[in-house]
Amino acid sequence: MCGIIGYLGYREAYPIIINGLKKLEYRGYDSSGIAIFYDGGYNLYKTIGSVYELEKKISYNIKIDEKKGTTGIGHTRWATHGIPNDINAHPHVSNSNELILIHNGIIENYHAIKIFLSKKGFIFNSKTDTEVLVNLIEYIKNENQLSLEEAVRISLNEIIGAYSIAIVEKSHPERIVIAKLGSPLALGINDKEFFIASDPIPFLNYTRNVLDLKDGEMAILKRNHELDLRKITNNHKLSPSIRELHINLKQIEKGGYKYFMLKEIHEQPKTIFDTLRGRLSNELICIEGIESNIDRFINAKSITIVACGTSWHASLIGEYLLEDFAKVPVEVEYASEFRYRNPIIEEQDIVIVISQSGETADTIAALKLAKAKGAFVFGICNVVGSFLARNVDAGMYTHAGPEIGVASTKSFTAQITVLFLLALKIGKQRSKITHDRYKLLCKELGSIPEKVRITLKIDNIIDTISRNYHNVENFIYLGRGINFPVALEGALKLKEISYIHAEGYPAAEMKHGPIALIDEKMPVVIIATQNSVYEKIIGNIQEIKARKGKIIAIVNKGDFQVSMLADHIIEIPTISEELSPLLTVLPLQLLAYKLAYIRGKNVDQPRNLAKSVTVE
Ligand code: F6R
């Protein structure tokens, strides 16, 4: 998975491409490259490392004139085929040096094509599937004396896999051909310019008019501002549908915070408010996607929730809520497992797919499988207009705003909020929740944004704990009931940004193995808020103390019993057990952030990760 960007217009392409790439680094940042075209030629710069490294390399070594040119393409990579290095970085160039290509996605049948092309005399320098594609296009173009666009179209019909691509012919820099299947591609358009990018954010300063290429579409863009949209399979001409994008640029800036992750953690009072906006009013829950399909939800025999990573943790919380409020059996599955195991889904079943990005490859595949099996598919997603959003039968946006930090934070709490609304609504419609409980929970839900704001004021204690433990190699996270998935989420956050090994467990399960890990060096973060299993949790804390483990406990304000036992306590406001994950996760997000920060890690761009995992 990678970020791609392109420009065709009258301005210098270099600054547009390089700055745009910086905004796409959430998609990958192990290597990057750009090509800037002038009449009759081009300059190509590639490097291992982030876009910052690329910019540095260019400003040290390249004359200003070399950067001039009003057509350009750029790429920031997250390696799939071939290790991150200068050679495997994009753009890739065909053997004759005529065609220059950038690609996001994966060509599954590249090996067979590579063997075929090798027999025809083609040489490959990199280990990438992209270099195979650019040479396939060259081969088909030359063999059949075709225009670039026709050669691209015919080549793409030979491809199995996913792609969004942009390709330029050296001798015709006045034209870019783009195409999409599976991977995202947005086209920005204004009077005299075209902007191409994996998402519209890099070109928002220039235009808000966006054409979202659909799967199986390609476009030929020309400097005279001609736009020719076509279907890849049969070359049928299509009429473009352009939408105006409404987005506040402040939402995608750091706003004084050192990292996007920290900004996004602190945005949660507002994002949860935004998630509730227009959907919860006094005791009324109004959700368009449910109202219009209410019979489906009332008659559902079972619900399966599929997701990956943090969205999967939110799904586990959804399972507790839906079973508790709506009394409907729920299964939660990793999308990557669901898609390959022929699950039993019947027509009256509902499949809920959850994804922040709406483009996670495994989640999308699970969505398609659920639809093929006849399920009613309900989506929960953050990115408006994403593949998921466009392909479910109904759904709800989380309205958390753009999430740039690779580690998901505000999306997680927005997903839980949506699941809470959903579970309450279905519970009420199925008459499985008493009116008094429903009323109380609606009221408490409305108070959550303010309680989140209060909870986040724990800088001092987070700082103290982080300074005590930033050198340890392992952490354990424990929770019970609805807070067990929060323990999993806390451990995931810590692992992915600080590279400290961490495990999450249901607290009582600890006795069945993990307790062997406890010694005086092991910090154990335990969610010990007052709830139906409070006494049991105290028992678990005693067990850890007896083995000299260090206890970091998340407790309700004023807690006495746990405070007597723990090495550190982090207090959160009192709230019903069902809503507690929305508060208990906050200290865990902040703790992961601070530990990573003290250890000097790049919090927003952890190694080996990318924001949207568009490969399986
Ligand atoms: C962890 C994280 C990932 C994502 C996962 C699914 O902080 O961000 O685990 O949650 O890759 O992504 P989405 O929700 O976009 O499908």
Image (cartoon, grey):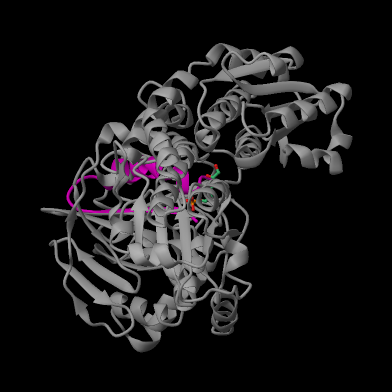
Viewer-proximal residue among 612 and 56: 612
| Residues shaded magenta | 1-30
Is residue 183 shown above or below 27? below
- Furthest residue toward bottom: 144
Rendered-image quadrant of the C terminus: bottom right
Is residue 450 shown above or below 302? above
Is residue 267 shown above or below 6? above
Q: Residue at x 56, y 64 (%)?
A: 128
Relative image position of residue 502 (x, y in whole percent): 72, 36
Q: Is 611 inside the magenta-drawn segment?
A: no
Q: Residue at x 29, y 85 (%)?
A: 234
Is residue 494 shown above or below 255? below
Relative image position of residue 190 (x, y in whole percent): 14, 52
* 406 left or right, relative to 461: left
Relative image position of residue 113 (x, y in whole percent): 54, 80
- Furthest residue toward left: 191
Q: Is 12 inside the magenta-drawn segment?
A: yes
* 336 left or right, relative to 562: left
Q: Residue at x 70, y 22 (%)?
A: 552
Residue 470 in view here:
no
Relative image position of residue 244 (x, y in whole percent): 17, 51
Residue 368 in view here:
yes
Residue 188 occupies which quadrant of the picture? bottom left
Q: Residue at x 55, y 25 (%)?
A: 590
Viewer-proximal residue among 599 and 326: 326
